[in-house]
Image: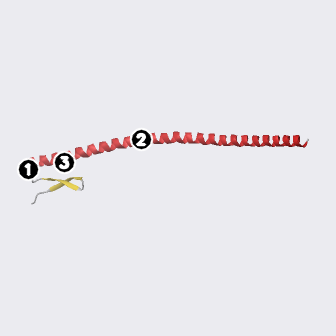
Amino acid sequence: MGQERIPLLMVDSEMTTFDFGTTMTESIDHLGKLEEKIVKAAELFRQAQADRRSLQQEIEKLRADFKDRLKRADAQEQELQALRREREDVRNRIEKLLAQIETLTKADSAG
């Protein structure tokens, strides 16, 4: 019978196997390398989780900022509309005053 190999873990598209025909030292070295890969994968996973939490916090901050800016833009739009209405009212009043002045000056010229 040949040496039996048992697949243990797929890491970086590479199958890690345990060979029953190896010496104890080779087996321990192999397990040590496997442990290093697992520790590295766990560290990468923890870092990815931390990055994800950080990005989620940034998204929430940006959403809050966006809502605040939207509220301010709405308030400015309402103020702009009010100022336009006020300007139109002032324009109408001035036109009426000019019409009255014109009527008075015509009456003085005729009389």
In the rendered image, residue 10, in percent from the top left (x then y), is placed at 23, 53
Label 3 belongs to which residue?
34
**Residue 62 x %, y %:** 46, 42
Residue 13 horizontal side relative to residue 82, left or right: left
Mark 3 Cα-neighbour bin, 10 Å: few <14, some 14–19, many ≥20: some
Sequence-wise first label, 3 or 1: 1
Of marks 3 and 1, the one in the foreground: 3
Q: Which mark is residue 23?
A: 1
Q: Is residue 16 left or right of residue 66?
A: left
Vertical placement of residue 87 versus 6, above or below: above
* Mark 2 and mark 1: Cα distance apart in space: 52 Å
Q: Nearer the viewer, residue 110 or 57?
A: 110
Q: Which amino acid type is marked by label 2?
A: Glu
Tell me which numbered mark, 2 or 3, is placed earlier along the sequence: 3
Q: Quadrant of the N terminus?
A: bottom left
Residue drawn at 39 percent across, 43 percent down: 55
Residue at figure coordinates x 79%, y 42% from the top left: 98
Q: Amino acid at mark 3?
A: Leu
